[in-house]
Amino acid sequence: MKTASAYIESLKTMKTVAYAFGEMVADITEHPCFRPTINAMGLTYDMPRDHGPLMTAHSPITNGPVNRFLHICMSPEDLVKRAQLSNFLTPYHGACVGARCVGTGALNTLFATTFDMDKKLGTDYHQRFLAFLRYVQENDLTCSAMVTDAKGDRSLPPGRQQDPDVYLHISQIRDDGIIVRGAKAHQSGAAISHENIVVPTVAMGPEEKQFAVAFAVEADTTGIVHIAEAPASNARRFYDDERDFGNYRYGVHGSTLVVFDDVFIPRERVFMCQEYEFTGLMVQRFASFQRLCSASCKAGHCNLVCGAAAVAADYNGCGAVGHIREKLTEIAFQATLAYGSAIGSGTMASSTPSGVWLPDTIMVNAAKLQAVGAVWQASQLACDIAGGAICTVPSGRDLDNPKIAGMIKKYFRGRADVPTEDRIRIIRLVEYLVGQSSVIPTETVHGAGPSATQRLMIRKAMDLDYLKARAKSLAGIHEGSGIGCATLR
Amino acid sequence: MKTASAYIESLKTMKTVAYAFGEMVADITEHPCFRPTINAMGLTYDMPRDHGPLMTAHSPITNGPVNRFLHICMSPEDLVKRAQLSNFLTPYHGACVGARCVGTGALNTLFATTFDMDKKLGTDYHQRFLAFLRYVQENDLTCSAMVTDAKGDRSLPPGRQQDPDVYLHISQIRDDGIIVRGAKAHQSGAAISHENIVVPTVAMGPEEKQFAVAFAVEADTTGIVHIAEAPASNARRFYDDERDFGNYRYGVHGSTLVVFDDVFIPRERVFMCQEYEFTGLMVQRFASFQRLCSASCKAGHCNLVCGAAAVAADYNGCGAVGHIREKLTEIAFQATLAYGSAIGSGTMASSTPSGVWLPDTIMVNAAKLQAVGAVWQASQLACDIAGGAICTVPSGRDLDNPKIAGMIKKYFRGRADVPTEDRIRIIRLVEYLVGQSSVIPTETVHGAGPSATQRLMIRKAMDLDYLKARAKSLAGIHEGSGIGCATLR
Amino acid sequence: MKTASAYIESLKTMKTVAYAFGEMVADITEHPCFRPTINAMGLTYDMPRDHGPLMTAHSPITNGPVNRFLHICMSPEDLVKRAQLSNFLTPYHGACVGARCVGTGALNTLFATTFDMDKKLGTDYHQRFLAFLRYVQENDLTCSAMVTDAKGDRSLPPGRQQDPDVYLHISQIRDDGIIVRGAKAHQSGAAISHENIVVPTVAMGPEEKQFAVAFAVEADTTGIVHIAEAPASNARRFYDDERDFGNYRYGVHGSTLVVFDDVFIPRERVFMCQEYEFTGLMVQRFASFQRLCSASCKAGHCNLVCGAAAVAADYNGCGAVGHIREKLTEIAFQATLAYGSAIGSGTMASSTPSGVWLPDTIMVNAAKLQAVGAVWQASQLACDIAGGAICTVPSGRDLDNPKIAGMIKKYFRGRADVPTEDRIRIIRLVEYLVGQSSVIPTETVHGAGPSATQRLMIRKAMDLDYLKARAKSLAGIHEGSGIGCATLR
Amino acid sequence: MKTASAYIESLKTMKTVAYAFGEMVADITEHPCFRPTINAMGLTYDMPRDHGPLMTAHSPITNGPVNRFLHICMSPEDLVKRAQLSNFLTPYHGACVGARCVGTGALNTLFATTFDMDKKLGTDYHQRFLAFLRYVQENDLTCSAMVTDAKGDRSLPPGRQQDPDVYLHISQIRDDGIIVRGAKAHQSGAAISHENIVVPTVAMGPEEKQFAVAFAVEADTTGIVHIAEAPASNARRFYDDERDFGNYRYGVHGSTLVVFDDVFIPRERVFMCQEYEFTGLMVQRFASFQRLCSASCKAGHCNLVCGAAAVAADYNGCGAVGHIREKLTEIAFQATLAYGSAIGSGTMASSTPSGVWLPDTIMVNAAKLQAVGAVWQASQLACDIAGGAICTVPSGRDLDNPKIAGMIKKYFRGRADVPTEDRIRIIRLVEYLVGQSSVIPTETVHGAGPSATQRLMIRKAMDLDYLKARAKSLAGIHEGSGIGCATLR
């Protein structure tokens, strides 16, 4: 199995075409929009050595150990382990190894669905897929999965868009393979994967046969162009220095728009070609796998947010305050619901004819839906706990200017025994984790005083004695006079 | 009354010392970390011409019209109007004119509290203050208020910090004035105001006399240094271009750390000097005013978020979808609770001996607390509505590269009749408004499918027919056989 | 103006036909399903003597003081006062004086809408209405309003029901009046009012002319039959004694199904007859008034719940515990949002051509929607605070059985200085207020330990030190070694 | 294994002393406060015949099948099955078989903890316990567990109460056994169980040795007195008829205060006697088991609420309305989080030295905490869905009075093809399930219109076009003029 270094070296040998912030990327492994994500992906190659039981599995295909991200889930236990893996890994990178996550989903989905297709249609997709699966397991390759199309007008189905390319489709069928055209959007880690696995994004009808297509393609195949995301946190990496990045080593999403400009896919890598009646099944199975991983990952993210907020509170000198402990507990509660239900969905899984097991539908969807709420609630609470400085802390460069460096160290210090630089670093990590680059949501929490002060004022302002007296009167309680003596009139 | 141009010209004449991203700011009115906020502040000077009844008031001090931000609230109606002003203005700038907001709070607080101090102590603070008030009203000056100290170790009171400077304090009392030392943190718009009004941040005890100080000072007084905030959205302004800024014209918070390095304050501008027993009152009154303004402003912010999300949905082609309309309604509901309670707090106000009216304590605190929740919920919902592109959309510069510009225009298009550039602009505005620069909270919402898909799957997966049958059985309903025939056993 | 006694005497002289629990009611003023509500209504007659400024108003119709429930709101201040009245009164009865509330809504709605009808149609409805209004004001009569029809199949409009009677309608128009037929459901206090004012429940179309009808009718008119509600809390009043009723004096809703079996309405009491195009306006105006009152009343109810829960906590010996104080604060917060927005809706009112002012639509609807959530949240929190005894406390009769009375007094005692009977009374009041007669929601809160214990266990079980370490690592913090030394790789 | 009939017959032979509503209970199996719960308990005896794999287990103690409620959990799978059992069973009775649930907890806790005690202390508690376990398994007996003491003043520990009896304790130690004194409160099903197992309710300190006691006792032992709960829903059973009970066959909680008036416990049934240092462990283990069962049961309860609300909506004619389907989905979502986390806690269990497995602490506590919120949210939503009739529907007796029976059938009819009696039955079931006997929480939902109408009004009242225009302006979008042309100034 590969090391992180070998993974990075292998990326260097690829001819992947990528653009970022208006320019073509010369070496994707050195580029600030990709390297941090590559570092995170590297963990999936290096950490199995220390965490084998969790991060690897025995493959019946190769009859040897494989990275668990490439493993086919043949039992509820496999699903539970897969959820544990995502939950465990996220606090190590605090970012996104999405390519690896969707990879599991795509491989399992294609295993199960090509099996069903062959059984019903007499095709040979499952054998093609098994060959591909053996290849990636043996070579320990990163496989991203591409699902989300560009979509155009969301009120129209794929077949009725003005520009048919907004859903990826077959533009030509040849004896030796197919030509595909279109784009997949928001593709986490597609440009830094070895293989990209394409599957449909919605169930297709008979008039949308050309959109019913699934295949594997190397990320640097001719005709594929990657265009990088450009959020403020990425833009900052060109201007600021690492002291301002928060999660400096891993904190970039690394997603791209992936354009397929008439790309040829050889026959043996095509796993669906016009069999629209299986697209619904494929989409639903993929979603179940991906929601298992996503819910578990985001619960891990919330745990990390909890840790970061706790450090910030410690550095502020208020780690032991009651309402702060309550808020940390609330983050843990919300995260646990998502993770617990994800584990539950693995335990209550059901099997498919191919032997692949699928998470319980209602539990895995509840887990993912809860994860969304948990992350946003954790973000708000961490912002509340860490303080308004997460949007007002000065630049790392200011610490290099002797005219003001002393002022910053003096006035951004929290507890006297904590170096200001450490406090700024944890504040930047919280800024990164809760995603707040512009200031309104954060300023809202702290402007006009943090929420605890409003609660305090409400408590002081409410006339509880008066209300208690009203309650006693209605209950027929006459204190001091023995039993209340009440009559209906 | 001043125009925006005159306001900007007046700033150019000031010698305010400010640093940003490691360098001293040459001309604050041209600097990307300040100019957008100056533009927003400019609205408070230009818009009164078209919105006089709301944005100006009759001052009994000058016996003429004054900007409502400088007005003393002498009736519940004044408070209601003040809340309306903030709610109305925010959708025009989508950013923060915090200096003006806190200005109202500081002026009203000092009016009321210097009156009380003089009455009890026989001092002349109220007359000093009235002279200052007349001056700023006559010259239509922007007064920021400075409350929040650097605070150091939050578990310790001001008087017991290792470095006493972390709370601003009197370092020397002279016949002609005082020398003050310390810093105020997170000061919205302090560097682009004419006057800064300093008040205490917490109630002080007898051993904290030196921290019981209030005064007014010009922002460019010798010894005052401003150090700018440096969130990712500001850093981007050095590297990206305006197409990426979202709220390109106004979208910067403009806060600074304000350091007072032994600054002299003349006697006539000192409004409290060691009278610690009035600090609690001052803090509480200021908080009430500021929460009135903040709750109303943030409700306006939520309204703008609602509008931006609605445009994004329209451009995506799904403005009329049921769950999207429900989510827009939810934002409006949450915002209205904050604003409604703010208006209610003005209506139910109580008066002080000076004639200044204060918002109802419980209502104004409930309003502010609700505003926090409303902004975060609006952020999450807007993120949900607008789509994952708010963290994956490419850079404006990519549109200038002919190799990929066409791909972006083709694949980031939503509805066919909306230019892709417009769609990208509204996506960037949503990114700005919800504050998401790093990607996890947004990716959480959209990764593994948006929340509506999980709800759909839950609906499909639940066995409602079975549950209905169980309910009918327990209720003793035997359909088709007339009345249920039930017995206890 | 009437006293409560006079009100009760006047009810005795009426020939109102009412049924309850299968039997005709002999004397409504002595019946356990009505007397408690009559007691609550009595407060609206007796309390104005001590609370004149709030509970009475000057009527321009009679040029004298009238009960504020009968007052036409001719200014925002009138609306604010009306909201205050409901909020103030509810903690005195803890039940429902709904007939009086809807009375205000119906009188104001008809005042405004008959004015508009006459202006547009040249009818004389407004004059008829003014005569009626003067009559009820001069005689200080209770007017309930009847809006909600029986409705039948909710998927069908009034004109397409299998049985047309499920919406009240005109069955005959005569020179001297009209004959009406149908029923109004869930009518709070209709049977214990002097007058019932009927208005439509939904906007009607041209094919539903017969359903477009508004009129006033005395509650004991021939052909009107009242059938009482029968919730468990009412049933208990036939079997248990007052120690078990909780809110023993006032705690009955007193609603009836009101059947109109071809009832004649004289011409001068008819205020709408087939003018369907005004039904939408009428419904919307009534709803605005009623939501103003309802939101304010329910906020008052929450305040009372807060008081009752606080007494229960005191009696349990845990009134000072942190999480209990937080929960009481939360109730106050939620209640204040509803009340604050209601007050805000009055302040931001708009006027109609008739001079009647209407609450701001968005604020008054937000206030009512929030009131729903506030009451349920208050119920859950009060149940949590008061303890599981609210569903397991024995009967009052058990206290009369010497074999077990001592055991109950011994083992249901909380604090040693509080008589067990008092503790049981407040527990019964909480049971009543939160509406819990069967036990599952309450048992849920306390079975397997109250929520605070789960939060405690979560706090203990979360590995915060581990998570802190992960955060420090990602932030590049190496404690003890000075500044973190981090590189991108 | 026993049948339900045999269970009921066995209860008839017991001499259990119970009081209810002031009177001694002659035959507990015929009494309205106990029979419904006995019916529910009966299901646990009859249903195993059809649901063997779920409801029975193989016991290594008896080497035969036992009721799963009596089974010792020796693997994660056992815990998962146990959670499934509770979740599955609750929709069959809609009430509480709490005695059986806590039985599992007590048996497993004592198995594990007596093992640990013997190992450390050299005692023979585990052998005594095994003999008892074999006895109850062989005779298929219902074992309730008694945990919650009367508690007195909650601010004081057991050892410092004015009346020491408010915590059950050892009053005498003899050679052949012990005498105990005190009471256990809120004991679900204790009076209708064969055996009661007593364990401590909190961790005890060295000064509280006498309170450190665990034992098993037959429910009809001399000196034990049961005093029944008396909620409104029970009181109704003396006055109303079964048409009004909602869950007529099973819907009573059946809890009692259990007084121990110096009861003798033979030595072989004592499992802890003064070993205070094991009380903490015992309490924590019991809580984990009970929260597993409770969370799963309440999720099943929510499912039933969902079914009942759906039937009510169908009968109202609005089962297909969008917001109603959303609300049913929300109930399912909330329930699934609790159940999913419960299943997850079983999967992630850890083992004890005795071989008993314990649910994961954080997950099982999160599951229970979520169950509380789920039940209350389900109650509110069901109340919203089913309509205000759940508190205004007349008595069953009214249907027997020919004067009004026709009116009720006519006007309480929903869909024309559903008998009114069926609609009333489902309404009564919802009333029962959501626990609403007094009317305020329900009336709050429906008075002044249901929540959907307020949301509709908010949607209409918000000025979305204006807000969209503001967003476009800020984003620099000038529609129709091509690309927005924006400059910083």
Image: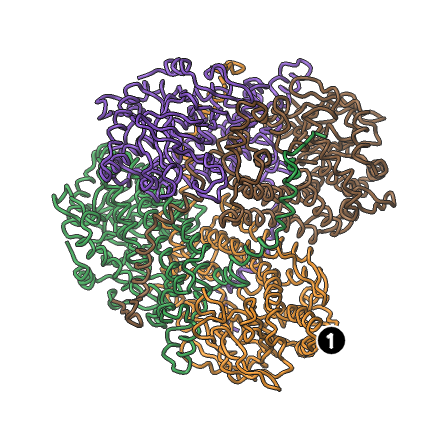
Chain colours: A purple, B brown, C orange, D green
Q: Residue B290's spot in the image, x, y percent?
A: 68, 41
Tell me if residue C436 comes above or below residue C36 in the rendering: above
Name the chain under label 1. C
Residue A198 can be seen, yes or no: yes
Who is closer to the viewer here, A118 or B199? A118
Q: Which amino acid does label 1 sit on?
A: Thr
Q: In which quarter of the image is residue C454?
A: top left
Q: Which quarter of the image is occupied by the C terminus of chain D?
A: top right
Q: Nearer the viewer, residue B453 or B8?
A: B453
Residue annotated with mark 1? C62
Q: Where is residue D277 in the image (x, y as percent from the top left)?
A: 31, 36
- Measured as percent of width and height from the top left, residue B252 is found at 66, 30
Q: In this view, does B385 lie to the left or right of B65?
A: left
The answer to whether B12 appears left or right of B317 in the picture is right
How far across and how far down the image is residue A229, in percent? 51, 27
Residue D176 visible in the shown view: no
Residue at the spot 31% in from the left edge and 31% down from the top edge? A271
Q: Which of C480 and D443 is in front in this view?
A: D443
